[in-house]
Amino acid sequence: MRAFEYQALDARGKKKKGVASGDSARQVRQHLREQGLAPIAVEMVEEREQGSTTSTTGNRRKLNNMELAVVTRQFATLLDSGLTIEDSLSGLIDQAESHKVKSILSGVRAQVVEGRSLADGLRMFPRAFPELYVASVSAGEQTGHLEGVLDRLADYTEAKQGLQQRLGVALVYPILLTLVSIAIIIGLMTYVVPQVVRVFEDNDQALPALTRGLIKISEFLQTNGLAMLLVIAMLLIGLVILLRFDKPRFAFHGLILAVPGVRRLSRSLNTSRMARTLSILIGSGVPLISALRSSSEVVLNLVIKSHLRQATSEVEQGASLSRALKRRKSFPPLFTQMVASGESSGRLGEMLEKSASALEREAESRISVVVSLFEPMMILIMGVVVLIIVLAILLPIFDLNQLIS
């Protein structure tokens, strides 16, 4: 039986969406009619995922980190309880609240029911289940340790989701503070300053240099403010488009690694992702070379990814992983030392996991320090700017008072 997505109208003319199983679309339509529904569209899930021309929702078939973490943890729990893969998938489909999740899991279950492996079923949905996930599940099925592999994947996806959530929360306040500060300064310069300074201009008073400079800046912003915003927006859009190409993106990532403070943070974040992925694959029984190739796909910095691929080639030729990594300066010394320790002790997977945790903590600590310093620095800059504006307004008043005296 296969999984089909359908759209149908009930007796009241209300549109309903869902997922149904059947041997053919015709059988599913007949089953819908027996339930009192008028089918509008019935499409096989697998065909929709592979890019059917009639697809309207295929581009949405991607599980976010939270959905993937929940599904993986529930799947591991059901398998640990003794259920078969098919029954576990049925339980996941019943529990799922999202139509998208139901559709994806139904497509996977249809593949399993037809006799294919779970990994083959997951491979039908590459946007929902990354290569790391599929490779780990495939190794777990081959070694008979699928439950343990899913437990590892659940821990990994939950840790990844938690890290992204903490980083996102840490960056929300600085971004809001920056935007509000810029908005306040623009408001003062384009509205408040012209209204106040106009009084002095009408009196033909000789204005201090600070006030004249502020007036010039205010007039420039009023005249060219929109044009500046358009230019900045176009530059940002152009930069985004340019970074879609490999060579400019590679150069940009190299520039990131050249900045002293940012270099260490980028190394820690990218290496921790790679180490966590590599530990899961090795722990699942995936060969080292295949695990290294899959791990390189989760590295976001193209320079580090290139160095990892070079190290993989050396390992393939017989070099040790730690020695191949040490020849590149893109990996933290702590990481290469722990890899060497893992290779010598035969606990490479465990050492990789520990190094990933240590690097993640280091990255979080550095981001926390930067955020904690950014707050008072932004407030100080804002205070200095406001002070300059206030002085530029008050100086002519002081001069006028002296003149009257």
Image (spheres, rainbow, N blue to C red):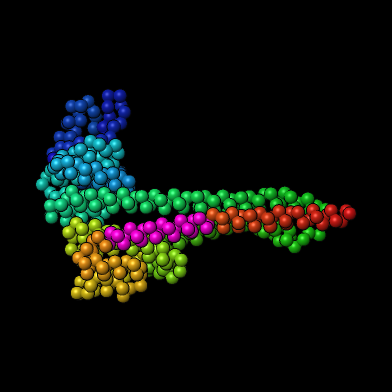
Residues 172 and 19: in front is 172
Q: Position of residue 124 (x, y in %)?
A: 21, 50
Question: Measuring 78% from the left and 50% from the top, which residue is drawn there?
Answer: 199
Vertical order, 50 against 91 (above or below): below
Vertical order, 305 against 388 (above or below): below
Horizontal arrangement in the rendering, residue 261 relative to residue 226 (left or right):
left
Residues 185 and 88: in front is 88
Q: Position of residue 338 (x, y in %)?
A: 29, 66
**Does residue 207 appear anywhere in the picture?**
yes
Question: Measuring 43% from the left and 58% from the top, which residue is drawn there?
Answer: 365
Residues 237 and 68: in front is 68
| Residue 362 inside the magenta-drawn segment | yes
Vertical order, 138 against 67 (above or below): below
State the extent of the magenta-drawn residues as a range: 352-374
Quadrant of the frame with the N terminus = top left
Quarter of the image holding residue 138?
Answer: bottom left
Q: Position of residue 164 (x, y in %)?
A: 38, 52
